[in-house]
Image (tube, helix red, strand yellow):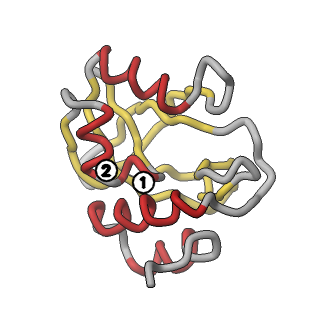
Amino acid sequence: MKSYFAYGSNLWEKQMTQRCPESRKLGRATLHGYRWIITTRGYASVVECKGESVEGVIYQLSESDEAELDRFEGVAKRFYRKAELPIKSDSSEIIALVYIDPITKEGHPHQEYIARINLGIADAGLPESYVNASIRRFIPENT
C-alpha cells in the first residue's frame, strides 16, 4: 500500500471510489512549500512556493489503484509526473505520492472540472479560509 495526497478533483469521494475502489481515505493533511493552481491545461496542480501550503486528503492505495490513477492523471502522456513528498497530518509526517503537472503557468479551469472540485471541497471539509485564499481565485462556488 502507498500513501497518496489528493488536492484536486480526487478530493471528491465518489470519483476516488470509482477510480480507485481499493483505496482508503485516512484524513486531511497538508503539503508545505507548495501552492494550489489551475494550469493552462485547465486542471489543478501544485507548484513550489516557499511559505505556502496545500490542504488535501491522504488515501492509502493498492498497486492496482495507483496504476488506475496513473492512467486517469495521464502519467504516460506526461500530463502529470509523480513525486513522493513529505505530507503532514495531525499526528505525523509521511511520504506520499503527489501528481504534479509539469506546466506551471496559471490558466482557467475546464467548465466540467469546476463542479468536481466543488464536490471535492465539500467532501474533504477543507478549511474555508484555505479554500477562499487558494482555490476560489480559480474555482468559483457552485451557483
Q: Residue furthest bottom?
A: 143
x and y, in percent, of residue 12 in the image: 33, 54
Answer few, some or many: residues within 10 Å of disc 2's Cα (few below 14, many 20 plus, some between 14 and 19).
some
x and y, in percent, of residue 72 in the image: 48, 31
Residue of label 2: 89
Q: Identify which residue is drawn at 44% across, 78% down.
A: 142
x and y, in percent, of residue 63 in the image: 31, 14
In the image shown, does 115 or 58 lie closer to the viewer? 115
Q: Identify which residue is drawn at 53% across, 32% down.
A: 73
In the image shown, does 57 or 142 lie closer to the viewer? 142
In the picture, measured across the screen, residue 118 lies left or right of residue 78, that is left
Location of residue 81 (image quadrant): top right
Position of the N terminus by quadrant: top left
Q: Identify which residue is drawn at 19% across, 27% down.
A: 22
Amino acid carrying label 1: it is Thr
Q: In the rendered structure, are the residues bearing label 2 and label 1 in contact, judged by CB atoms less than 8 Å apart?
A: yes
Position of the C terminus by quadrant: bottom left
Location of residue 20 (image quadrant): top left
Q: Identify which residue is drawn at 32% across, 33% down.
A: 19
Amino acid carrying label 2: it is Ser
Q: Which element is circle 2 on?
A: loop
Answer few, some or many: residues within 10 Å of disc 1's Cα (few below 14, many 20 plus, some between 14 and 19).
many
Q: Which element is circle 1 on?
A: strand
Q: State how many labels appear.
A: 2
Residue of label 1: 30
Q: CA distance from mark 2 to mark 1?
A: 6 Å
In the image shown, does 59 or 78 lie closer to the viewer? 78
Q: Return the disc, 2 or 1, that comes first in the chain's sequence.
A: 1
x and y, in percent, of residue 129 in the image: 45, 80
